[in-house]
Structure formats: C-alpha cells, structure tokens
C-alpha cells in the first residue's frame, strides 16, 4: 500500500507552505470528534509522523490553534491533551454536516430573492448558502414548497419574494452567475483525478492499520477543500455531468472501504486523558449514508 500512499502524501507536501494546522483540523474532525473529542499529543504525533511532518511543526501549529481559540490544551503528567473549544466545535459541526451529509434536497422550482438595503446582511446570507446577483440582490435555491428558504433570515431593509424562472436553462444560468459553480466543479474534478487510483485499489486490496487512517485523513482533507466551497445546490441547478456527484461517490466508496481498519488502529493506539478513545457514536455510521 506504500505505492498508493506515497504519491498522495507527496501531493499533500506539494502545497507550500505545509499547513499542518489544517491537517490537524481534519484529524480531529474526522477521527477524534466522533470518539469523545479529546486526543493526546502523543497519539496525534504518531499520526502526523506518518504524513512526514516534523513534531516541531505540529507543536507550533497546535499552539496557533490554541491561541486562535479553536482548541484548548491541558497537561496530565508529561503528556498534553487537546480538544475543541465551543467555538471550534460549532464550526466543526457545520463542516461535518456538509462533508458527510446527504445530497441537497430536490428543488421546488423557485428562487428566494432578497433585495438588501445595505451590505450588513450579505455575510450572514452567504454563510446560509445564498448567492449574489449584484451588490444588493441575493438569491437562494429554495427547497421548500412555498418557495422560500433560509428560515430565520430576516431583518430591516430586506424585501423578499419567490421567483420561478421560465425554463431549466435560465435556472442553471442564474445559478452559474450567483454561485461559484465552475470553480467548485474544478475542485471536485481535481479531487477525483487525485483519488481515482485509490478508488480502484480498495476494491481488491485494502490498507490496514495506520495506513488506512492516513488514507482516510488524506481523502477527507482533499474532499473538504471542494465541499466546503460548494453551495450544495439541488441537482436541477447544476450543469450536466456535474463533477461533484462523481467526487462524492468516489469519496464515499473509499471511505466505507477503509473505515473499519482505520477505526481498529484508533482502538488500539489512540488515547485521551482517560485512556483509550471511546468507540464512535451512532452518527459516525451514518456518514455518507445518503
């Protein structure tokens, strides 16, 4: 399996400078949060060494994550332990839903249009999945039957209405204008190109032990670069042959194939401040289920 992992790790290192903190975030989000959320520094370093990242680089990255309010750290004896802060946990929960959750619901056929009086709502709306058709006009792909989306999005200066495009071609053109559909599609295509060989390999030979966990973390680390930029539009608003569908299918296939071996390594080797990590909760089994 070294012949499969080595080029994937090389690809990770090709991005300079190495963002060790981003990888630590992926490790916690994918492997640690489902198992109670606490990990010893000793266990984390055992994982990051397999990525050919020096211990000092990881320690520096952790110090920055703590200073920025994403993680908290404490010591018991000679070992240090880490877990997410409340702020970090909330951000992880939102990311987890996007990475491992089901595809977007079917489209109702209506857009949710919001005319703004000023720019103070733009960031909030963009975070809720709205696209932009101009400096004062935001658009949502409303999945609900009444043609409105974004429950709780309200405030002074907003004019809100539902609008149905004349035909599917117009709907897709509007979506391409309002959201970064082409850019996200390219990200998905790159992901598929990088992991296509792994997808073929796991059908006949599956990594075990730490190799399985490393492959899983690399997989999610790369996939999240696309999916966290994806507005997750309904299929009716996406181009024919949308690369995101193939990317998600590939990611799910590899993930399900290697998850048992990766979890076995965590069972045997990863520790928290109370001993071995607890088993993952029921939400873990639902990843990529839909």
Image (cartoon, helix red, strand yellow):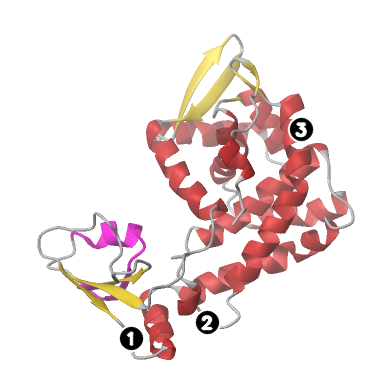
* Closer-to-camera residue (114/183): 114
Residue identified by numbered label 2: 239
Tag 3: Cα neighbours inside 10 Å, few (<14), some, or many (≥20)?
some
Which of pointers 2 and 3 lies earlier in the amino acid sequence? 2
The residue depicted at 62 percent of the width and 63 percent of the height is 248
Q: Quadrant of residue 115?
A: bottom left
Residue most extreme to the top: 77
The image position of residue 260, as x and y in percent, is: 76, 40
Which of pointers 1 and 2 lies earlier in the amino acid sequence? 1
Where does the magenta region start and end?
A: 120-137
The image position of residue 175, as x and y in percent, is: 40, 78
* Tally of marks: 3
- The residues tagged by marks 2 and 3 sit, at their Cα atoms, a distance apart of 40 Å
Work out whether residue 51 can be spotted: no
Residue identified by numbered label 1: 165
The residue depicted at 48 percent of the width and 64 percent of the height is 104
- The residues tagged by marks 1 and 2 sit, at their Cα atoms, a distance apart of 16 Å
Secondary structure of the residue carrying tag 1 is: loop
State which mark lies toward you, 1 or 2.
1
Residue identified by numbered label 3: 265
Secondary structure of the residue carrying tag 3 is: helix
Left or right: 139 as drawn, with respect to 20: left
Q: Is residue 20 above or below residue 266?
A: below
């Amino acid at each position: 399996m070294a012949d499969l992992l080595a080029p994937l790790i090389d690809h990770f290192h090709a991005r300079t400078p190495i963002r060790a903190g981003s990888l630590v975030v992926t490790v916690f989000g994918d492997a640690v949060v489902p198992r109670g959320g606490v990990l010893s520094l000793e266990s984390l370093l055992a994982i990051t060494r397999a990525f050919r990242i020096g211990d000092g680089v990881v320690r520096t990255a952790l110090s920055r994550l703590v200073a920025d309010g994403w993680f908290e750290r404490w010591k018991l004896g000679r070992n240090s332990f880490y877990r997410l802060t409340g702020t970090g946990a909330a951000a992880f929960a939102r990311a987890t839903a996007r990475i491992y959750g089901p595809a977007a619901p079917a489209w109702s056929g209506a857009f949710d249009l919001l005319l703004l009086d000023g720019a103070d709502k733009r960031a909030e709306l963009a975070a809720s999945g709205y696209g932009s058709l101009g400096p004062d006009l935001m658009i949502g792909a409303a999945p609900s039957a009444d043609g409105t989306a974004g429950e709780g999005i309200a405030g002074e200066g907003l004019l809100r209405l539902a609008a149905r495009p004349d035909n599917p071609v117009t709907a897709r053109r509007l979506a391409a204008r309002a959201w970064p559909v082409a850019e996200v599609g390219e990200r998905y295509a790159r992901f598929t190109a990088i992991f296509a060989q792994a997808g073929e390999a796991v059908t006949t030979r599956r990594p075990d032990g730490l190799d399985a966990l490393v492959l899983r973390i690399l997989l999610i680390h790369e996939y999240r670069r696309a999916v966290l930029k994806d507005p997750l539009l309904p299929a009716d608003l996406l181009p024919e042959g949308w690369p995101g569908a193939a990317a998600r299918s590939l990611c799910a296939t590899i993930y399900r194939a290697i998850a048992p071996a990766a979890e076995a390594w965590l069972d045997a080797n990863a520790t928290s401040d109370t001993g071995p990590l607890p088993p993952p909760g029921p939400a873990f089994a639902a990843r990529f289920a839909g």
